[in-house]
Amino acid sequence: MVRLSIVGCVDVNSITSSSIMQVGDNVNTALQTRVFAVQREVPIYYGNEGSFEAYPFFRRPIPIPQPPEPFTMCVDNLGSFIRVRGIRIISITATSVLQIGSNRITSGESRIKDTRQFVTDKPGPKEQTTFVKMSTADVIG
C-alpha cells in the first residue's frame, strides 16, 4: 500500500558531511564519508600523506547488523497518509538521512581518523596543567 506523507513544516538548521534530506519516495540511498584529519603543533605537510590505504581502519568491511533470530512482522496501515505537524532538526551530519516518504534500500558509511601530532609530550608549555588549581582560603574576589 502506497501512503502519502503530509508534513506541515520542516526546519533543518544544517546538513553536512555526506548527509541527505529526501522529500518524496526514493528507491535507493547510498551515503559515504571518509575523513582523515591531522592536527599538528608545527604545520608541515610532507606531500605523501593522506592515503586511506595506509590505515586498515578504512579497509575493513563494515559489519551489517542482522536480526538475532527470524521474526514475523504485521503492519496495519490505517489510512492512506501519514500526517506530521512539524519536524525541527538542529543538524543532519556524518552520513545521516532525513527521509520523508518511502525508501527501499538505505546504506551509509562514515569513517573518521583524527590524528594529533605534537612536538612536546603534551600540548602547551611544560608548566601548564589541564587542572584548575583551587585556593584553600575562603576569599571572594
Image: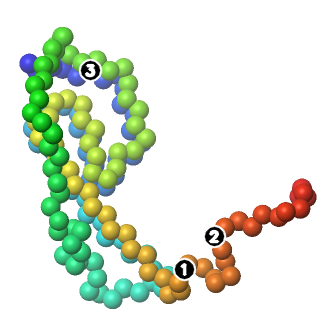
| Residue at numbered disc 2 | 130
Cα distance, mark 3 to mark 2? 52 Å
- Residue 44 location, x and y as percent? 41, 87
Q: Residue at x 19, y 76 (%)?
A: 53
Tag 3–tag 2 contact (CB < 8 Å):
no
Q: Residues within 10 Å of mark 2 (few under 14, many from 20)?
A: few
Amino acid type at mark 2: Thr
Which mark sits nearer the N-terminus, 1 or 2?
A: 1
Q: Quadrant of the C terminus?
A: bottom right
Cα distance, mark 1 to mark 2? 10 Å
Q: Residue at x 11, y 29 (%)?
A: 71
Which mark sits nearer the N-terminus, 3 or 2?
A: 3
| Residue at numbered disc 3 | 6
- Does residue 10 sit above or below 48 in this rendering? above
Amino acid type at mark 3: Ile
Render colour scheme: rainbow
- Does residue 126 sit above or below 61 in this rendering? below
Helix, strand or loop status at disc 1: loop
Q: Residue at x 34, y 50 (%)?
A: 93
Q: Residues within 10 Å of mark 1 (few under 14, many from 20)?
A: few
Q: Residue at x 91, y 58 (%)?
A: 139
Q: Nearer the viewer, residue 81 or 77?
A: 77
* Viewer-side label of 1, 3: 1
Helix, strand or loop status at disc 3: strand
Which mark sits nearer the N-terminus, 1 or 3?
A: 3
| Residue at numbered disc 1 | 122
- Residue 52 location, x and y as percent? 22, 73
Amino acid type at mark 1: Lys
- Does residue 53 sit above or below 119 in this rendering? above
* Residue 12 picture quarter: top left
Q: Is residue 107 left or right of residue 119?
A: left
